[in-house]
């Protein structure tokens, strides 16, 4: 079913990108508010991470279920429900009187966000021919990536002038506008219909959430036996889920997709790319405030050389992907991001902010190049009916990478530093940057064997 009014491609891009924008904004705008939240609620860095990880873990755990419902009942319907739940969750975040309430509200927002990004990708990809997808996904990433620019700066401005709850009130008018315009203009489409078995849903959600939670908590808790039990049970649930998927005729996660080297490699490289990025974004604003002594507003502005490159480079990267193929762009992107983070670790002790700009630009350019390339790798490896499921799996890998990367960054930081003094914070920050740089460079080994779609197209024409 299509909308009654024809939709210009630009509006298609804007409306589908808006969901990605809001989802990323909710992650990024909190970064410069982290110090204010930690101070206001009198919590540790270890506890603070759950204001971030609760959101990402929820999205990763619920995403495939939400996508399956969207594929069955309509991608636009699922997208609208996601926008609505996300907006309601943002209201609860703004009203949070303590960290437990905030974490719970972030879970609600995460449920809504779990379908916003993958279904927007599926709606956009389904409406365009293959030859235009790379460019469109590059622009989609650029528009959504505006949150990387606006988020930290706007969050810093709000914290400096008002209070941190207002970073969540901002989502309400944007969410209402997105629901109204998407309901009126976006085309409806469906994909592969999967019958959801309740036990599969429980196993998937419980398995993913439990494993990531255990990995994040185990290194810093005194109740390690209980956490290990959760990890083992969650691993068992995940294994049982995969066993079920292999034997059902209508799998929620078609394991046959992973037979493609491009699909598997693209998702694993995506996991590493965003694990590194989220680990850095959690600590970089805090480093600027605690070590360099900047306020929240200026910390957001000083991140701009990193985040601003996404909007500038991503659309160009999409065109380059269409022309030269995904593999070169993915390799360059992962290498530049990893190199940028390693340089940050080396230059962090310097008091001259200007020295931090080149590595920030390198890291941002790397993310901007690799992101569209890996998106096209994953979506280009499946047939059109499976686009929604492929987009869902891609975003699960992206968000699981973010949750694991944040947990790994917190582990490294707490092992070698603490936020009580600038000197200790700096030591922990440097070690964390080395770790995140290493994660990104590990992606080079995964992306190296990938064959570009342009090469496959050339081979098919010759045959």
Image: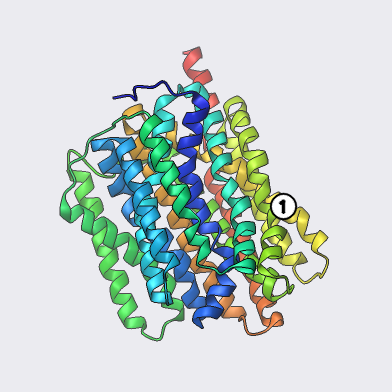
Q: Which residue is mark 1?
A: 305
Few, some or many residues within 10 Å of mark 1 (<14, 14–19, 20+): many
Is residue 47 in view? yes
Q: How many marks?
A: 1
User: In the image, is 369 to the left or to the right of 6?
Assistant: right
Of 430 and 35, the residue lying toward us: 35
Residue at (32% x, 24% y) in the render: 2
Quadrant of residue 392 in the image? top left
Residue at (67% x, 40% y) in the render: 312
Residue 190 on image: x %, y %? 28, 31
Is residue 264 in view? no
Of 422 and 322, the residue lying toward us: 422
Residue 357 on image: x %, y %? 77, 56
Residue 347 on image: x %, y %? 77, 65
Residue 417 on image: x %, y %? 62, 80
Taking the view exactly as shown, the residue that stands out farthest to the top is: 462
Question: If the image is split into quadrants, where does the N terminus sit?
Answer: top left
Q: How is the image coloured?
A: rainbow
Q: Is residue 236 above or below residue 73?
A: below
Quadrant of residue 206 in the image? bottom left
Of 459 and 78, the residue lying toward us: 78
> Judging from the image, what secondary structure is the residue with disc 1 in?
helix
Of 287 and 211, the residue lying toward us: 287
Q: Is residue 405 above or below residue 77?
A: below
Residue at (70% x, 69% y) in the render: 288
């Amino acid at each position: 079913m299509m909308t009654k009014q024809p939709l210009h491609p630009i509006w298609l891009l804007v409306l589908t990108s808006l969901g990605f924008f809001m989802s990323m904004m909710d992650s990024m705008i909190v970064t410069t508010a982290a110090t204010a939240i930690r101070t206001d609620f009198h919590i540790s860095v270890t506890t603070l991470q759950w204001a971030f990880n609760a959101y990402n873990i929820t999205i990763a755990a619920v995403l495939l279920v939400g996508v399956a419902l969207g594929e069955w009942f309509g991608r636009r319907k699922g997208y609208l429900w996601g926008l609505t739940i996300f907006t309601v969750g943002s209201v609860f975040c703004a009203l949070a009187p303590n960290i437990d309430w905030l974490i719970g509200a972030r879970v609600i927002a995460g449920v809504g966000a779990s379908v916003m990004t993958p279904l927007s990708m599926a709606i956009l990809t389904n409406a365009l021919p293959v030859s235009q997808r790379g460019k469109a996904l590059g622009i989609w990433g650029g528009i959504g990536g505006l949150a990387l620019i606006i988020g930290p700066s706007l969050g810093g401005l709000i914290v400096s002038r008002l209070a941190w709850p207002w970073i969540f009130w901002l989502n309400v008018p944007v969410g209402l506008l997105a629901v109204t315009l998407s309901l009126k203009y976006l085309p409806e489409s469906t994909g592969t219909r999967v019958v959801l078995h309740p036990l599969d849903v429980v196993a998937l959600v419980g398995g993913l959430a439990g494993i990531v939670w255990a990995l994040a908590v185990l290194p810093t808790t005194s109740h390690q036996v209980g956490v290990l039990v959760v990890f083992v049970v969650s691993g068992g649930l995940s294994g049982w889920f995969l066993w079920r998927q292999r034997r059902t005729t209508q799998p929620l996660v078609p394991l046959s997709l992973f037979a493609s080297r491009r699909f598997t490699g693209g998702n694993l490289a995506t996991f590493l790319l965003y694990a590194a990025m989220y680990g850095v974004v959690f600590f970089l604003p805090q480093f600027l405030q605690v070590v360099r002594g900047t306020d929240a507003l200026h910390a957001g502005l000083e991140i701009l050389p990193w985040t601003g490159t996404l909007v500038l480079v991503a659309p160009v990267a999409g065109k380059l992907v269409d022309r030269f193929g995904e593999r070169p762009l993915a390799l360059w992107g992962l290498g530049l991001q990893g190199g940028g983070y390693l340089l940050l670790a080396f230059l962090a002790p310097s008091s001259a902010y200007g020295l931090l700009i080149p590595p920030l630009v390198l890291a941002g350019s790397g993310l901007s190049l690799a992101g569209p390339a890996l998106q096209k790798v994953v979506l280009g490896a499946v047939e059109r009916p499976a686009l929604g499921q492929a987009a869902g799996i891609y975003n699960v890998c992206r968000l699981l990478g973010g949750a694991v990367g944040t947990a790994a960054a917190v582990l490294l930081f707490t092992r070698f530093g603490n936020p009580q003094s600038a000197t200790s914070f700096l030591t922990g920050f440097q070690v964390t940057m080395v770790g995140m740089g290493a994660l990104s460079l590990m992606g080079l080994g995964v992306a190296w064997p990938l064959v570009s779609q342009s090469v496959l197209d050339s081979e098919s024409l010759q045959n």
